[in-house]
């Protein structure tokens, strides 16, 4: 239980820092959030919990393959906000576009024999 609370605290701290930085600099906040901090933290936590190097390598490659289609979210969100959509609808549109992209991406990876 203590490990879970530590993970939660560290993760919340990263989000809190980014949300405070955005008040001063959208550039710096975007840079902080774009860093693979959650991936790094989850890899460290998984390693501490006994995952092997092979498991961590597979996990890392899985993250790589999922990051690429997730970028669609940011493009769609920014465009919908530029079209003056409300934040809630723009977020929903970004999520919907990302879900569709994930589905198509997984099919495309399958065509090339890439398994995650």
Image: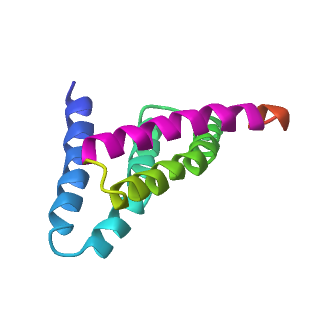
In the rendered image, residue 77, in percent from the top left (x then y), is placed at 40, 52
Residue 116 seen: no
In the rendered image, residue 52, in percent from the top left (x then y), is placed at 58, 35
**In this rendering, would 28 be left or right of 99?**
left
Residue ID at (42%, 32%)? 49
Residue ID at (16%, 75%)? 24
Q: In this view, does 71 lie above or below 4?
A: below
Q: Which color mode does the image show? A: rainbow
Residue ID at (23%, 60%)? 18
Dividing the picture into quadrants, the one containing residue 110 is top right
Q: In this view, does 114 lie above or below 1?
A: below
Residue ID at (53%, 50%)? 72
Dividing the picture into quadrants, the one containing residue 16 is bottom left
**Quadrant the N terminus occupies:** top left
**Quadrant the C terminus occupies:** top right
Question: Which residues fall within the magenta stretch?
Answer: 87-108
* Residue 101 part of the magenta segment: yes
Q: Main secondary structure of the magenta part?
A: helix
**In this rendering, would 65 be left or right of 71?**
right
Query: How many discs mark residues in the rendered view?
Result: 0
Residue 36 seen: yes
Q: In this view, does 58 lie above or below 22?
A: above
In the rendered image, residue 71, in percent from the top left (x then y), is placed at 52, 53
In the rendered image, residue 34, in percent from the top left (x then y), is placed at 41, 61
In front: 48, or 116?
Answer: 116
* Residue 104 part of the magenta segment: yes
């Amino acid at each position: 239980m203590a490990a879970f609370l530590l993970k939660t605290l560290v993760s919340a701290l990263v989000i809190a820092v980014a949300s405070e930085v955005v008040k001063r600099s959208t550039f710096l906040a975007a840079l902080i959030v774009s860093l693979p901090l959650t991936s790094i933290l989850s890899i460290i936590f998984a390693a501490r919990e006994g995952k092997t190097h092979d498991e961590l390598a597979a996990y890392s490659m899985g993250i790589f393959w999922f990051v690429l289609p997730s970028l669609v979210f940011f493009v769609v969100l920014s465009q919908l906000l530029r079209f003056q959509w409300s934040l809630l609808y723009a977020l929903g549109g970004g999520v919907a576009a990302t879900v569709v992209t994930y589905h198509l991406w997984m099919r495309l990876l399958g065509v090339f024999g890439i398994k995650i």
